[in-house]
Every structure is written in C-alpha cells, then in structure tokens.
Image: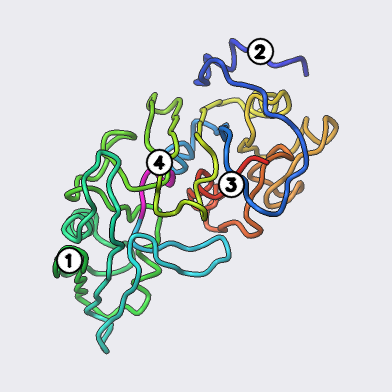
Amino acid sequence: MTRIDRRALFTSGAAAALLAAAGGSVDAAPKAGGTLRLAVPREGGLLEQAARGAVYDSLTEIGPDGLLRGELATAWQSASDARSWTFELRQGVAFHDGRALSADDAAASLRVQGIAGAKLRDASALGSHRLLVELAEPNPHLPYLLAAADQVIAPGGDLPAALGAVPGTGCYRVERVQEGRHFRASKVADHYKAGTAGWADAVEIIVIPDAKVRAEALREGYVDVAALPEPRGLLKRGEFLYHPSASDMALAARHNVGLPRRIGQRAPLDDGRIAERWWLA
C-alpha cells in the first residue's frame, strides 16, 4: 500500500493537522501528557461510545481489573429485600459548566433514562449528596447495572441528545464535535480522578470509514489507536499492540500507547473508558 492519501483521510472525517506519534517502549506505570488519537469506523457507534466515556460519569464503574467500584457514588447499601437502595455521592464534584453535582441531578437522570435490567419505581434526593433508589422488584445487582455505559448522570437529568450538548463530570471537557465525524476533548484540571485516570492532555476520536485507511493512519503515526477487524498490512510494517490478539483483534495500537493490564470485555473500547484509562509513554 502506498503512503496515506491525506485527502482520503480528511474527507472520511479526520481533523486536519494530526501530528505523528513518537515510537518507544511503554513503561508499566501510566504517564500524563500528550494527545491520544483514536481512529474508528463509521458504523457501530464507537465514536459516541468512547466520547461518552470521556465526558460523562456514572454512579459506579467496572474497573480495568474487572471489579466494581464507586464513581460518582462513594458508598451504597440496600434494605434487606434489595428493593430500596441509598447511595452516598462524592463531594466537591462539578459539571463542566461549573454547576455542582447534587443528588437531585442523579435522581432526575435515573428517572429519565431508567435502569436497564431493573424495574425502577422511583429515585429521589435525601439531602444534597444522598440518593434513594426504589425498585419495583428486588435486585441485588443494582450497583453493577448502574455501571453500564449508558447510565450517565447529567445536570437536572437533561440527558445529552448529541455529543457536547450537555456538560458532564468526566475527565474530559468537549472542545469541538462534528457529529459522526470527529470529536476532541481536553483534560479537566483538578478532576477528582486526577492521578488515577485521565492521563492524556487531550483525546481525539476520528471517524475513518475504510479499514485500510485506518491501518495506514496508524502505521504512519497519524493516530495512536485504531479499531481494526484484522492486522492485515500491520504485521509486516513494524510492531503494534493488538487487542485481544493478532488473530482475533478489535484494536491495534502503537507501542508508545499504554493500556490497563485488563480491558473490559463487554465492548472493544474498554466499555467506553479508553479515553481516561489509556495513556502515551
């Protein structure tokens, strides 16, 4: 294959002035800095999935180690029948427009979107940072269900109809969006996850419909990670990281990209968490 056709790259939705990524080995410890660039196909909603994970938070999350942990919630407990649950929300969290997160925001978000896998009866605030969730039927798995990628918390329950339309509480604030084509966000200063997630200074997601062009963009250093169905054209042109493997892959990355030792298995992009959990060495 010849060198990348820049016109094809840009007309397929890529942003201009992408910089080549430097090669090198990846250390075990995450490093801060740089712009993490990801190329995805048009189909499958991967742009929206990865962008949503960068901008919005949920009450709980599944860590890269596969364990449940709090995100906007710091603790929770249920009544003995697993119908009534109380969640303690994290203090000092603000949406990207400066509004403080409250239990009213969480309650409204749950009432609007419901809870996939559970029958929500009601959600209400018990003070500024305490949330009551009442189910119509017992469900001991509620904290796991609330970690789903679509269980985001938005101000006043005003769930985003389009990327960038509603501020979130995630590690990254939207800079610009071209719907279905391109997304860029910058790291939020003094975020509550600082030092544990959100390593890159900025995240850029580019839609490139043609898998061959995505592979070429990765080879030439225009992107750091690409969603690819197979390693064709890569194995003979340098070493790359493959997930889950070179024979059964969903993603390929340059060797200067660091990623968690375990990656979520429910979706190829770490359940939408690639923006905050991957880094550049």
| Residues in magenta, as a range | 52-57
Across and down, in percent, residue 104 comes to 16, 58
Identify the secondary structure beneath mark 1. Answer: strand
For label 1, the residue is: 123
Verify whether residue 54 appears in magenta: yes
**Tag 3: amino acid:** Trp
Disc 1, disc 2: CB below 8 Å?
no
Residue placed under numbered mark 2 in the picture: 5
Say which of 75 and 44 sits in front: 75
Residue 240 place in picture, x, y as percent? 76, 39
Q: Which residue lies furthest to the front in this view?
A: 190
Q: Whole-Å distance between the Cαs marked 2 and 3?
A: 28 Å
Foreground of the two, 94 or 10: 94
Measured in 3D between alpha carbons, the distance from the residue under mark 4 to the one under mark 1, in whole angstroms, is 29 Å
Neighbour tally class for label 2: few under 14, some 14-19, many 20 plus, Cα within 10 Å: few
The residue drawn where x is 35% and y is 79% is 140
* Viewer-side label of 2, 3: 3
The residue that label 4 is drawn on is: 188
264 up-or-down from 34: above or below: below
Quadrant of the rendered structure where residue 110 is? bottom left
Q: Where is residue 205 in the image (x, y as percent from the top left)?
A: 50, 32
Residue named by callout 3 = 278
Q: Looking at the image, is mark 1 or mark 2 earlier in the sequence? A: 2
